[in-house]
Amino acid sequence: MITLKSAHEIDLMRRAGKITAAARALAGDMVKPGVTTHEIDKAVEHFIRSQGAVPSFLNYYGYPASVCISVNDVVIHGIPDNRVLQEGDIVSVDVGAYIGGYHGDCAATFTCGKITPEDQDLIDVTRQSFFEGIKFAKEGCRLQDISAAIQTYVESHGYGIVREYVGHGIGTEMHEAPEVPNFGKSGRGPRLLRGMTIAIEPMVTAGSPSIYQLSDGWTVKTLDGKNAAHYENTILITDGEPEILTAPAI
Ligand code: MF3
Ligand code: CO
């Protein structure tokens, strides 16, 4: 069942979203050569708690941290540890915060020092694919209009779209109905209605979209070892432009 949020619930989701977006920005500012991913995780957790919120990811199905930090060929769900970020790394940060009974969820890929033009293009296309998708995130469109727009944009740039992980509805639970794939056919899927809140999150690979999971049960890497990028915001469907709840978007 896809829930429709009331005006009051939307206010609560705006609050959760703002904290989540600020946490993403804080993490992004910390992405520098010499910093460990654990240090970023701890600073973000401290920030989220200082806002009276709780990190959504911590202990989610046993996830051991507050942030997913996915470096280079790690696509998603990288677990923060003593890895030291290096000049040239691309660093995907995914974070969620829970306050007032509602979740925010957002992600972006940040650059560590000077990176290659190829990696910058991967990051730019991934981010822009989200904005191509949300052109169809409004009442009256169908869910896969979003999916198809993302897929078309990404694949026209020669990149891969991950199939095994998708975006999702979000609200009192971090993952609610519907699933929001980053691939599909326009005109299919549920009709979008004002009051729906969804997280749209393209996961894009420089090469083949094939992935595998490490034995830690979380870390997802590209099979071909090429880099990947991720971009996500929680949005509200309206009868006009969608509202980005994890604002400001990066
Ligand atoms: N942030 C992911 C998503 O966008 C979920 C993270 S899984 C967790 O749906 F275990 F780290 F929380
Ligand atoms: Co998400």
Image: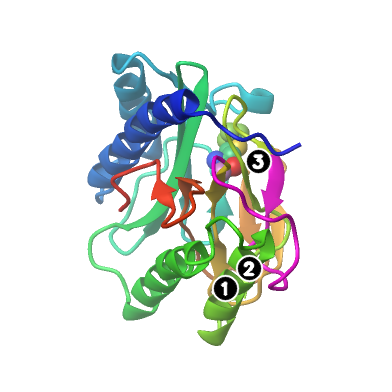
What secondary structure predominates along the stretch shown in magenta?
A: loop
Q: Nearer the viewer, residue 150 or 62?
A: 150
- Residue 2 location, x and y as percent? 70, 39
Q: Quadrant of ligand 2?
A: top right
> Tag on residue 218?
3
Location of mark 1 (residue):
149
Label 1 crowd (10 A; few <14 / some 14-19 / many >=20)? many
Q: Secondary structure at mark 2?
A: helix
Asked if the residue at tag 1 contacts the one at tag 2, i.e. Cβ–Cβ closer than 8 Å, the answer is yes
- Vertical order, 122 against 57 (above or below): below
Instruction: Report which quarter residue 59 is drawn in.
Output: top right
Q: Secondary structure at mark 1?
A: helix
Residue at the (67%, 62%) spot, across then down: 142
Instruction: Work out whether mark 3 precedes mark 2 in sequence or the reverse, and give the earlier one.
Output: 2
Location of mark 2 (residue):
145
Q: Give the Cα separation between the discs numbered 3 and 1.
A: 28 Å
Label 2 crowd (10 A; few <14 / some 14-19 / many >=20)? many
Q: Is residue 157 magenta?
A: no
Residue at the (55%, 60%) spot, across then down: 202
Q: Nearer the viewer, residue 242 or 171?
A: 242
State which mark lies toward you, 2 or 1: 2
Q: Is residue 191 magenta?
A: yes
State which mark lies toward you, 3 or 1: 1
The N terminus lies in which quarter of the figure? top right
Instruction: Work out whether mark 3 precedes mark 1 in sequence or the reverse, and give the earlier one.
Output: 1
Q: Is mark 3 within 8 Å of ligand 1?
A: yes
- Residue 198 location, x and y as percent? 56, 45
Span shown in magenta:
177-195
Q: Is residue 243 left or right of residue 88?
A: right
Q: Is mark 2 within 8 Å of ligand 2?
A: no
